[in-house]
Structure formats: C-alpha cells, structure tokens
Image (cartoon, rainbow, N blue to C red):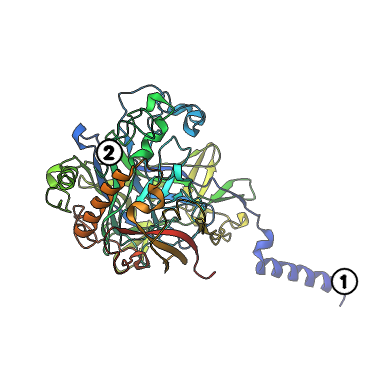
Amino acid sequence: MNLVLRIAFWIAFSAYGVLLSPAQTQRQPQRSSDGLSGYISMTVPAPPDEYGYGVSLYSSAWPLLAQPLRGFQIGLASIWIIPDNRDFNEPLLPKGTVARDNWPERGPSYRDVFETIEGGLGFWASTRYGSVTAKFRMNGTANGYNQEVSSPGWGFGETRPLPPEQMGIAQLSNRLLVPPDGLTFDKGTCGELFGYAWMVLPLVKAKEQTAGLAIPTGNQCWTLFLNAKNFKGPVAFYTPATWSRVSRNYPPAVGRGLDTKRGLVAGGAIEVNTVPRMLSEDKHGAVFTKIPELQFPADNKGRTVLIHRLTHYSKEAVYRQVEAWMNGGPAASSRFDDHGARVAQVKAQPLSLRQGPDHSPIRGLDDWLGTTTVGTDTFALQWKPSALTPWTSTFQRARFPQYFKQEGKEFMAVASGAVPDESGLRQASFDPSNKGQVYSSPERGDSVWWRPGPKAGPYTAKLADGSEVTYYWYRFVDQPALQSADLSEADKDRLQAVVENIHRAWTIDKEYLPPPTMGTIAKLDPGLIVKPPRGMEVGYVPVVTRQTDAKS
C-alpha cells in the first residue's frame, strides 16, 4: 500500500471510529447533589381556635422515579403541624439546639421549628431499602431538630434505635407493623389516594409534675389514623412527655408544646430537598444540566392531585367521645363527627424551585406544568399536553423537565433535543440506591427492649421493598417507647385498659376519616398486616425490632 492510500485509509478509519464511538468526543459530566430544591406548595387559612385538635388529608402515592436512586430526597405532598405559639415572641428553644444555633432567620421565637409533626409520603436520602413507590413516615421533632422521631423505637433514618429518653412514638395498632424505614405500599400503586389524620386523643391524664419536676405535661396524644384499602384506624401516637421534655431545663418552653397547645397547619407542600444533577458544557462553553426523570400520574384532564380535602377538627370530632368513653361511657364511634370538621379552602402557590449551590431560580417550567386547584378543596398540578404520554389504564404519565440551560444567574428548562451531544448528558445515568444497612435493636441485655420485654416472638414478615422485618408481641404498656414516658404504674394500668377497649371496638374494617370525593384509595403492602397470636388479640401490639435485606 503506497503512502497516499495509507493516509486515505487512516482518515476514513478515524472518521468511522468517531461515528461508532461518539462518547469519545463527549465531555464527562460533573456530578453534584444540588439538582433541585424548593417547594410545590399551597396555603390554607388558619381555622378558628377550636379547630386545632386534629387534621386529615388525602395525598397521592406513586413511583416518582423509575428506580430508586442514591442521594435522592423529595417528600410528596404533606403537611407540618406546629404548636400554636403565634402570640409568643421569646425564644422557645434554648441555646445548644440545632435550630437556635444554626437558623437565626427563624428567630426570635423559633416557633416554626420548635416542635413539629411532619413526615408523610416521600423518598428520602436516608432510606435504607429503596422502593419504587413512596413510603410513609411519621417524622417529628420535639426539640428544635436535636433529635427526630420517626417510628416506635427509631429516629429519622437512623439505623441505631433511639435512647429511651428520646423515644416518642408508641405502637397502638395490633394489626399493622411500623418498620423503621417507613410503611410500604402494594406493588403497582400509582396515583391512588392515601388518607391519614393526626388526631388529639386524651389517652393519658395531664400531670402537674413531670419526672419529679414542677413542670406540667398535658394529656394530648397526637394519634395517627390511616385510611387505606386494606387498613383503617389508629396506628400509633406521640406520648405527651415527648413534647414537654424540652421545657424541663428551659422555663420559656413550659406549656408551649404539642402536649398542651392546639396544632397549627397553614398549608401543605411537596418539599424538594436533595436531587442529584449532572453538569456539562457544549463546545461553545454553554452550561447544561440534567436531573433524574421525575414522573407524575395525571388524569384524563392532565391533572395530578397532590392534596385532597385537608380538614381541620375540633374536640367535637373524636376527643369528647373518647373522653366520655374513658370515664365509663359508651364506646366512642370510630367515625370522626362531621360537626367537628371543617374542610379547608386551598390556595395554590406558584412553583418555587431552584438549582445549584447558589439556589438559582428555574424559569420556563410553565411550558410543562403549573399549580392549580380543583374546586376549593384539592391542590393539584396542571400539565401541558406536550408533557403527557400513556401510562396506566387510569393515568397518563406526566414528565417534569429533566434538562436545563444556564442563562446568567438562572436556569432555563429545555427539551432534551436542545441538549448538544458533546455535553454527554443525554447518555449519562444516575447511581442506583445502595442496599440498606440493618436496623437493629439490642438482641438481649438490660434495655427497654427486654425489660419488661415481649411476650411472644420473634416473627418475621417480608415487605414490598425487599426487606424483612423481625417483630415481637408486647403487652401494650411493656413496649420500649413507653418505658421513659413518665408513666406511673397506675398510669400504665389505666392506659392498658383504654387500649384494650380500642382494640375491641376500633377494628381495621371500620370507617374513621371522611372518605374522599374523587379517586380511589391506595392499598398498603399486605406484608404489613398481621394477626395477633391466640390469646393476644386484645391489649398486645407488634413492635418491630429489626429490619434487614430479605435476601441476607
């Protein structure tokens, strides 16, 4: 082969190689955790004072991602409950708490971060067993985010159980397991409505002294009720002492917690916390970014229901009936009394989403979606037809913008076709979630898990997220979370009798929350539903002591 032919062959072969391997000319995208942050939110008017003793809502459950990803956290539409301290302007938190030491913008009272019940449906970076469908957690903080409580025995995403003095949630249901990694849903859940309520019940008596100190503790037990296709009724409650602990060495907080104050709910939101992103440039230096594909179920009108029928309750809804029941009256009806209910009128807020370390505003989202209301009681997203494709027999698939172009101090949402090949973004993929660490309580020893200890077990159950939970049956007042709840033996005897009445009368097939006026009800993971052993049908509860990979 002469030199001319050899050069021509080399040129052709090189060009052919480029065509076969375009990745050789592509840039390597940079990875970070600041792909998306902010809120998709609504507001509601504050109800009259007598309506701060419970709140319920329906929230849609669906697979936001096609597969679980590492470092991803978005809470689906939910609410925050805080004690109503709007008339108090002194610092509610002492120095040394996370909120007071790090969030001066919340001062001077820190009332919004003093104590909260939040959680709800979502996907969290701390999830140990990734699930395609959202999970449900009952997260809350009683001391300015020094600690967070999420289940009977565990904190928010922590694999080691909480110390006894930090536990705050007591297992109430004798038919539903509460795993530390969150409640799972039936496989295939997509767009169904999951109903839940936090209702104040007077399950314990108020105290003038707390732990031997001249600090009062109220009687308000904020109790979680669920409305799913295969489970209805109460699940667990926060013990009143959980809320009064912060005041034991800090007088300004005395009488200001959720054990005594009514709860304030001002709205609801999807909270976007941590979303991975990739960043790259084209050959001209223009910056483009990519986030994971986020998918939403949309009805035949292109709407995704986020929150439906947020309802405030007075003590007339259930509190008064339970109070009379505990004093020897007839069994309280399971159904919340409509006379004590007030459905909130919702107001959709504009999208408030940002990207990057400087929280740069994102523009152009209105070419894909916007917030809206359906009637007066439903908060939703309205999608443009171009964002919709077929999905299930009931819902279309709506896709949130995945690509963005930096324009000055803002990012503009763009279609995938606007992203140049040399950026390498369209071919790049995000890291799948890791297999989970084990949640484990002390196996034996002198701890609240074994003194007084369980009466039966261990039992195991496999869940839809690929995990396996181990649980034991405890006499209700013997469960770990009640051993540091400032209850005397007389208090425990009284509470045990109350719970036995609840187990007899409030079964999982009765109605509690008002039903939704649209959609269908979601189904919990059947693996969560259990049946008490013979002789333990009343007065005993299943407490999860371990969660691990079902294959290990």
The residue at 59%/58% (across/down) is 421
Left or right of 21? Residue 95 is: left
Name the residue at 45% across, 63% down.
Answer: 66
Q: Position of residue 280 (x, y in %)?
A: 61, 50
Which structural element holds mark 1? helix
At which x and y percent is residue 487?
34, 42
On the image, the x and y values in percent for residue 197 come to 27, 49
Extreme-right residue of the structure: 2
Residue 379 shows in this picture: no
Q: Amino acid at mark 1?
A: Leu
Q: Is residue 457 left or right of residue 204?
A: right
Name the outermost residue toward the front: 489
Q: Secondary structure at mark 2?
A: loop
Q: Between residues 484 and 24, which one lies in front from this camera angle?
A: 484
Instruction: Indicate the position of residue 529 as horizontal and vertical percent values.
Output: 33, 65
Return the mark for residue 219.
2
Query: Which badge, 2 or 1, is on the more N-terminal residue?
Result: 1
In the depicted structure, whether residue 94 falls above or below residue 293: above
Q: Which quadrant is home to the C terminus?
A: bottom right
Residue drawn at point x = 74 percent, y = 67 percent: 14
Say if 329 sits above or below 193 in the image.
above
Residue at 41%, 66% (x, y): give it.
Answer: 457
Whole-angstrom CA distance, mark 2 to mark 1, is 95 Å
In the rendered structure, the answer to whether residue 498 lies left or right of residue 288 reads left
Kind of residue indicated by mark 2: Asn
Mark 2 nearby-residue class (10 Å; few <14, some 14–19, many ≥20): many
The N terminus: image quadrant = bottom right
Task: Report the residue that reaches farthest toward the top.
Answer: 90
Reading the image, the residue beneath label 1 is: 3
Looking at the rendered image, the disc whose residue lies closer to the viewer, 2 or 1, is 2
